[in-house]
Amino acid sequence: SNSFNIDDPFQFESELSEDDRMIMETARDYAQSKLEPRALKGNQEEHFDPAIATEMGDLGLLGSYLPPEYGGVDASQTAYGLIAREVERVDSGYRSFMSVQSSLVMFPIFKFGTDEQKERFLPKLATGELIGCFGLTEPDHGSDPGSMSTTAVKTDGGWILNGAKMWITNSPIADVGIVWAKAKENQDDEGEIRGFIVTKDMDGYSAPATKHKMSLRASETGEMVFEDVFVPDENAFPDIRGLKGPFTCLNSARYGIAWGTVGAAEFCYQKAREYVLDRKQFGYPIGANQLPQTKLANMLTDITQMQLLAWRLGKLKDEGRSHHSMVSLAKRNNCGTALEIARIARDMHGANGITGEYRVIHHVMNLESVNTYEGTYDIHGLILGREITDIQAFVPRG
Ligand code: TGC
Ligand code: FAD
């Protein structure tokens, strides 16, 4: 139609298939009825309710794009993104749980695992009976995971893991962890990155929680500590070697974040609009002034760009035509823009903007992490810079 929708100006939702729309509506109903009422308390009490895992599992929201024999619903990439958008509209921490479980745990097992590993883990991860985590970052190696120091040294029938991962979403509550380590045939070997599946009962493995975060408080974050942990051969991914392994998973999670941040930005924009229309100062609604109006116009323009980028990338992924630099562009733009929108929406709420009740500062604080994890804003800028110039600028020269 020729109407102008102030939440979807370029009508991207009208392009969605019937299946995608159904999944979006399922996710929206669930997020609004079951997650929204928990979000403030989860944030205040720094608590993730593990029942969320099985609730999402029951609705097919975990590993949605995997085939049904492994617990997925054969959803499109667009549908996966739409789930992230609905969940992150409520809280980036809940979306983090969903992203890690789907893209960083189920996806690598599906893509790199043996048939036996898939059968052992995927159906229960899909129902949320098992919770997973993904360990790449270390205390001393964040943006540069290739320099990791966690090792896996070959022994009879398996591998001995030593080292530590840090800032790991879900780790304190996870039953299963995907860990990336330098695999060595012997102590002198330089080693090659490989992926291993660890389980919480393994001797020498612990996952202490990282408390007192000011961001993503409704999501559990912790370490993964390995002290001579024996991991049997049947828990190693057989063929994948090098950074390509973890980066392949990140491509999927980063794509989901590009969509998730659309939801967070839409929430902040809609709340700012409601607020300035409702609240009066100097005898008129604040929204009758020029500055708030152009702030809303800028937000809507930015959100439209975010929506169209995420939607187009989903299409390209479904058609098998995406490139990881497209993912970097969308992740970087959408995280940075959502954070900017959330900060402006916070300002437009005046003092109310700092309260939990309005939940705008809650998004500001969350989006600070989202802009940092899965490759920081600047690291994605450098990935694009390298693509554009063919010169890497991660390592200084001279
Ligand atoms: P580089 O030389 O660029 O690449 C090494 C090998 O990897 C391949 N590769 C990729 N493959 C697939 N997808 C990608 N996106 C890929 N990027 C690179 C590349 O082709 C090469 O393969 P080969 O066969 O030639 O060996 O490696 P580098 O060491 O120079 O990398 C630099 C850089 C900055 C790009 C990279 O290290 C990077 O992306 N750093 C950011 C780290 C990061 O994103 N960590 C995320 C941790 S997980 C997380 O944050 C989860 S939070 C989730 C939540 O709670 O929601
Ligand atoms: P650093 O790499 O030390 O970077 C610090 C600053 O320096 C950044 O601004 C960065 O952009 C800049 N910088 C770094 N290198 C360069 C350079 N060459 N040129 C210019 N600037 C540079 N990781 C996981 O593996 N699994 C998880 O589940 C996970 N969950 C997370 C959850 C939360 C809440 C958070 C906050 C992080 C999580 N992470 C996880 C870790 C995350 O991926 C890292 O924090 C991120 O990759 C950045 O690494 P770093 O924190 O070590 O920062």
Image (tube, helix red, strand yellow):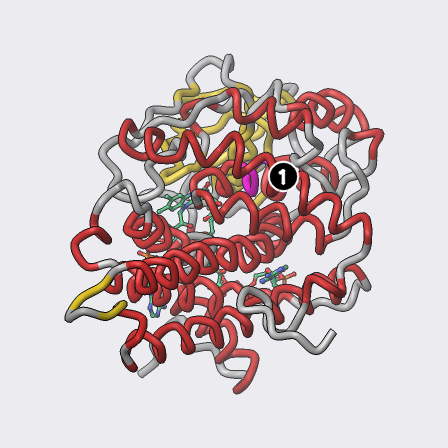
Q: Residue at x 79, y 63 (%)?
A: 320
**Compared to 223, does 27 lie above or below?**
below
Q: Nearer the viewer, residue 63 or 355?
A: 355
Element at badge 1?
helix
Q: Residue at x 68, y 67 (%)?
A: 12
Q: Nearer the viewer, residue 248 or 358?
A: 358
Left or right, residue 392 beside residue 280: right
Residue 194: where, in percent of width, then height? 60, 41
Q: Nearer the viewer, residue 232 or 316?
A: 316
**Compared to 391, does 113 lie above or below?**
above
Q: Residue at x 37, y 66 (%)?
A: 341
Does residue 71 appear in this view? yes
Residue 8 picture quarter? bottom right
Does residue 163 appear in this view? no
Q: Which residue is mark 1?
A: 102
Residue 5 picture quarter? bottom right
Residue 250: where, in percent of width, then height? 57, 52
**Compared to 354, does 204 lie above or below?**
above
- In the image, which residues are magenta? 98-102
For the N terminus, the quadrant is bottom right
Magenta includes 133?
no
Q: Amino acid at mark 1?
A: Ser
Residue 57: where, in percent of width, then height? 65, 27
**Compared to 255, does 228 lie above or below?**
above
Q: Nearer the viewer, residue 346 or 190?
A: 346
Overall secondary structure of the magenta section:
helix
Residue lying at the far bottom of the rendered structure: 389
Residue lying at the far front of the rendered structure: 283
Crowding at mark 1 (Cα within 10 Å: few <14, some 14-19, many 20+): many
